[in-house]
Amino acid sequence: MGGNAEMGGRPMRIRGYRAEDREVLKALTVEGFEGVSIDHNIERAFGVIHGRDWRWRKARQIDEDIEADPGGVFVAEDDRGEVVGYITTRADQESGIGWIPNLVVEAGWRGQGLGRALIEHALDHFRRLGLTHAKIETLEQNPIGNHLYPACGFREVARQVHFVREL
Ligand SMILES: CC(C)(COP(=O)(O)OP(=O)(O)OC[C@H]1O[C@@H](n2cnc3c(N)ncnc32)[C@H](O)[C@@H]1OP(=O)(O)O)[C@@H](O)C(=O)NCCC(=O)NCCS
């Protein structure tokens, strides 16, 4: 499954995940989520925990997403085959609801519609699977997510507050 397109005049395509993408996706993740992740907030408040920094915890989520459904991970690459973004998904057939746990576009490619294109790709994937709804979350401190998701048709349904304490 793939689709060719242009973003800001630059050719790119969205394709399915391959095993060799894993480390690149994890690197994009730790770059992209700096300042916009719960794990980074925790580290700002408490420092490094258990010898693992926020990057380790955040990158581990990508392993979990790949483990849960490698066929639901989609990768954007430029015309040289460089990975410039990705989106991960979970399809809950029983509930009819698809979930987008993680989405990143490399900094140099942002603001040209690639994030939206990845979301649309994931939504089409959900539709093909017969799902009827999709969910995604963002932090209050993430202005791009707060702008982009409503612009992609998502409606706000809840706000959640996260707490952490020392033991
Ligand atoms: C979120 C992310 C994937 C979006 O990718 P992208 O390719 O820039 O997305 P798009 O270009 O399709 O859309 C971005 C939209 O946000 C808007 N935007 C950019 N900076 C903004 C800001 N500071 N405040 C509000 N809106 C902003 C853009 O104008 C664009 O909206 P428009 O199409 O109405 O003009 C990308 O910014 C990213 O990887 N961020 C770091 C990781 C992250 O936050 N992931 C999502 C976690 S919930």
Image (tube, rainbow, N blue to C red):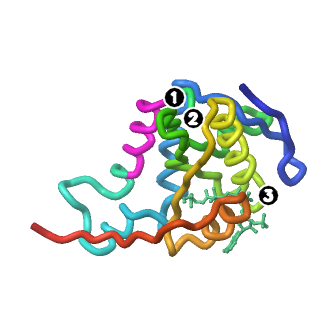
- On screen, residue 72 above or below 38: above
Range shown magenta = 58-69
**Disc on the earlier residue, 3 or 2:** 2
Q: Name the residue type under label 2.
A: Val
Between label 3 and label 1, give the one nearer the viewer: 1
In the picture of the structure, the residue carrying the numbered disc 1 is: 70
In the picture of the structure, the residue carrying the numbered disc 2 is: 73
Q: Name the residue type under label 3.
A: Gln
Q: Is mark 3 within 8 Å of ligand 1?
A: yes
Q: What secondary structure is the stretch in magenta mostly built from?
A: helix
10 Å neighbourhood of mark 3: few (<14), some, or many (≥20)? some
**Disc on the earlier residue, 3 or 1:** 1
Dot 3 falls on a residue whose secondary structure is: loop
For marks 2 and 1, give the CA distance. Answer: 5 Å
Residues marked 2 and 1 touching at CB (< 8 Å): yes
In the picture of the structure, the residue carrying the numbered disc 3 is: 112
Q: Name the residue type under label 1.
A: Pro
